Image (cartoon, rainbow, N blue to C red):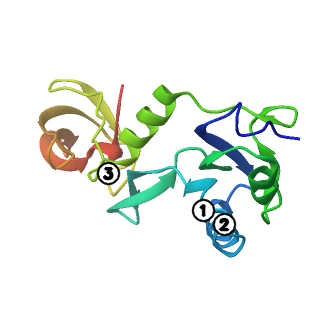
C-alpha cells in the first residue's frame, strides 16, 4: 500500500489512464473526490494540454492537444485512502507512475515547466526557415512545388515563397505549416 502522510507531503503525481479518456478520468476523479469528501487530501486534477496550430482542409486551426496522452496529473497527499480513491477511478489503468505500489512525486521543475507550457494563450509559431531558403510546399493547391522563401511574417505564421510557374517566379503566401525546408 501507499506510504502514510507523515512521510509524504502535498505533491504532484502522474496517473496512468487509457489514452483518449484523460478528460473522463479527470471528471470522474473530481466527482469521486467531492462525493467521498477527499478535498483535504486530493487538491487538483489536471489534464496537461497545450495549444497547437493545425491545418485542416486548407484552414488554420488552433487545437488543444494533450501534452502527455494517457496521463492525468493529481496534486495530493498520498495516504491509503487517497491512493485508493485515485487507483479505483474508472479508466485508470495501473494507478500512479512509480515503482511498484509506491507513487513517485514529479519534480518541481517538471511541474513548473509543464504549467508554463500550458499557460500560454497563443500557440507559438515554430519556424525553422529563413529568407532565401529553398522549400518544398507540402500542403494546399501548390503541394509538391518547390520555391525560395522571400519574406517571413512570424506574427501571422506566414511565409511568402517565390514558386516557378509558367516560366516565371510567382509569389505565393503560405502558412509555416505548409512548407518544409529542403
Q: Who's the residue at 35% across and 56% down the image?
A: 140
Looking at the picture, tell me which residue is in the foreground, 82 or 50: 82
Quadrant occupied by the C terminus: top left
Q: Estimate the spatial distance between the alpha carbons at disc 3 and disc 2, rounded to whole Å.
A: 53 Å
Q: Secondary structure at mark 3?
A: loop
Q: Estimate the spatial distance between the alpha carbons at disc 1 and disc 2, rounded to whole Å.
A: 6 Å
Mark closest to the chain's N terminus, 1 or 3: 1
Residue pointed to by mark 3: 142
Residue 33 numbered mark, or none: 2
Q: Who's the residue at 33% across and 57% down the image?
A: 141
Q: Who's the residue at 82% across and 52% down the image?
A: 93
Residue 33 pos. (x, y %): 66, 66
Mark closest to the chain's N terminus, 3 or 2: 2
Q: Is residue 110 above or below residue 114?
A: above
Q: Secondary structure at mark 1?
A: loop
Residue 25 pos. (x, y %): 68, 63
Quadrant occupied by the N terminus: top right
Residue 158 pos. (x, y %): 19, 46
Q: In the shown orientation, is residue 14 left or right of residue 89?
A: left
Residue pointed to by mark 1: 39
Q: Estimate the spatial distance between the alpha carbons at disc 1 and disc 3, rounded to whole Å.
A: 56 Å
Mark closest to the chain's N terminus, 1 or 2: 2
Looking at the picture, tell me which residue is in the foreground, 53 or 83: 83
Badges 1 and 2: C-beta atoms under 8 Å apart?
Answer: yes
Q: Residues within 10 Å of mark 1 (few under 14, many from 20)?
A: some
Q: In the shown orientation, is residue 102 left or right of residue 146?
A: right
Amino acid at each position: 500500500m501507499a506510504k502514510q502522510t507523515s512521510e509524504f507531503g502535498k505533491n504532484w503525481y502522474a496517473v496512468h489512464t487509457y489514452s483518449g479518456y484523460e478528460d473522463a478520468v479527470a471528471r470522474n476523479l473530481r466527482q469521486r473526490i467531492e462525493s467521498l469528501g477527499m478535498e483535504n487530501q486530493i487538491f487538483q486534477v489536471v489534464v496537461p494540454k497545450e495549444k497547437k496550430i493545425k491545418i485542416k482542409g486548407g484552414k488554420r486551426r488552433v487545437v488543444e492537444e494533450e501534452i502527455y496522452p494517457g496521463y492525468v496529473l493529481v496534486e495530493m497527499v498520498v495516504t491509503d485512502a487517497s491512493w485508493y480513491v485515485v487507483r479505483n477511478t474508472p479508466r485508470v489503468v495501473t494507478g500512479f507512475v512509480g515503482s511498484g505500489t509506491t507513487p513517485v512525486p514529479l519534480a518541481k521543475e517538471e511541474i513548473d515547466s509543464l504549467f508554463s507550457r500550458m499557460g500560454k494563450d497563443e500557440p507559438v509559431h515554430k519556424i525553422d526557415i529563413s529568407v532565401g531558403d529553398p522549400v518544398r510546399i507540402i500542403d494546399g493547391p501548390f503541394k509538391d512545388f518547390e520555391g525560395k522563401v522571400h519574406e517571413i511574417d512570424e506574427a501571422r505564421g506566414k511565409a511568402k515563397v517565390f514558386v516557378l510557374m509558367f516560366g516565371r517566379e510567382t509569389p505565393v503566401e503560405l502558412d509555416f505549416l505548409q512548407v518544409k525546408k529542403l
